[in-house]
Image (tube, grey):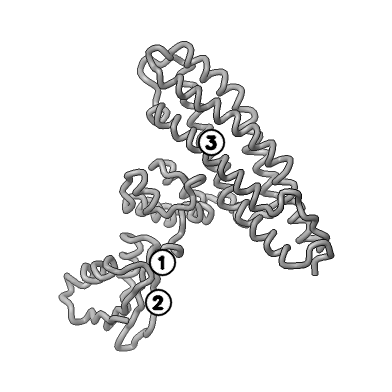
Amino acid sequence: MDSLDITQIDPQLKHPTIFHCFDALSHGEGFIIDNDHDPKPLYYQLLAERGQTFDWEYIQKGPDRWKVKLSKMKNNQIPTIGELVTADFRKAEVFEKYGLDFCCGGKKTVAEACAKRGVDASLVERELRKVESQPSRNAHDFSTWNLGLLVDYIINNHHLYVTRSLPFLSEISNKVARVHGDLHPEVVAIASHFETIEFELETHMHKEEKILFPYIKELVDAKQNNSILTPPQFGTIANPITMMEKEHDTVGDSMAAIEQLSNGFIPPNDGCTSYRILFAKLQEFQQDLHQHIHLENNILFPKALKLEKELLKRKLGSPLQ
């Protein structure tokens, strides 16, 4: 592995040279920084300007020479948006601000999501680091919750919210479309997209509550009670999860289309009270939907897949050992 002797470089050019060498690396490649003191300030500058895209490993710590192996992470090592939000849900506010999808699009890295949206990734990274530096507001750490408890939370909070919101939003979106559709054809399209959302979510939540969620609770019980795991009729849990994620994508696409058609939920100057209520409620609905899908796609589903895999390694149809 190549070594870069920092002591031989002009002080003003040291960090720019290291950044140039780092940026030229392919994912998985690295080089050794050789210095006469601990280059820790460089670590913080890299973190500030390149985010969590590198590995930092001390090879030698003084007293006369300090050597650090600096490597660019492989693509599959860079945390995804979903993983970042799972670790710290406060970061969801940053992604919401820039229109970056952390639920259905949660498997993309920050750089990938920003490139797709046309957003400055360095700006997003800076705001994410500001969030990290702020004291925690004691938000729920859903990643540590028992899966049965998480299922109940999703049903009692998000499913209930959707169930209560759908009739009102359906009625008011159609009302606004009838009244303002001639001058603002976009509200007709919004009503159509919401009709798709309503249909998808009603059938989607029914399947989750009657099929998928009860099986997840069976997995939890089998693990906790060392009991028999009955194979489900749908094969493995990967099958319904794949279907649920596709339906999440459909709803997410329709919601994104509504956001675009509504100019970011900003009503026109001639919009009546119903018009303004519709846009405010749609924005609230989208925010809840994002957290709802995030909890399922990025926390519940991966943990359920892992638990089933663990249980299936043992002999099905007999007490778990």
Q: Nearer the viewer, mark 3 or mark 2?
A: 3
Q: Quadrant of the N terminus?
A: bottom left
Look at mark 3 in the image and give the residue it sits on.
Answer: 251
Q: Is residue 174 above or below residue 296?
A: above
Look at mark 1 in the image and give the residue it sits on.
Answer: 74
Q: Secondary structure at mark 1?
A: loop
Q: How crowded is the residue under tag 2: few (<14 C-alpha within 10 Å), some, or many (20+)? A: few
Residue 216 placement (x, y as % from top left) = 71, 51
Checking the image for residue 57, the label placed there is 2
In primary-sequence order, the first of circles 3 and 2 is 2
Q: Secondary structure at mark 3?
A: helix
Q: Which amino acid lies under the numbered mark 3 shown in the image of this protein?
A: Val
Q: Quadrant of the C terminus?
A: bottom right
Q: Is residue 290 left or right of residue 271?
A: right
Q: How crowded is the residue under tag 1: few (<14 C-alpha within 10 Å), some, or many (20+)? A: some
Q: How crowded is the residue under tag 3: few (<14 C-alpha within 10 Å), some, or many (20+)? A: many
| Between 230 and 209, the one nearer to me in the picture | 230
| Between 180 and 96, the one nearer to me in the picture | 180
Which quadrant would residue 8 be assigned to in this image?
bottom left
Q: Gap between marks 3 and 2, in whole Å?
A: 43 Å
Checking the image for residue 91, the label placed there is none
| Between 124 and 76, the one nearer to me in the picture | 76
Q: Gap between marks 1 and 2, in whole Å?
A: 15 Å
Residue 132 placement (x, y as % from top left) = 44, 56
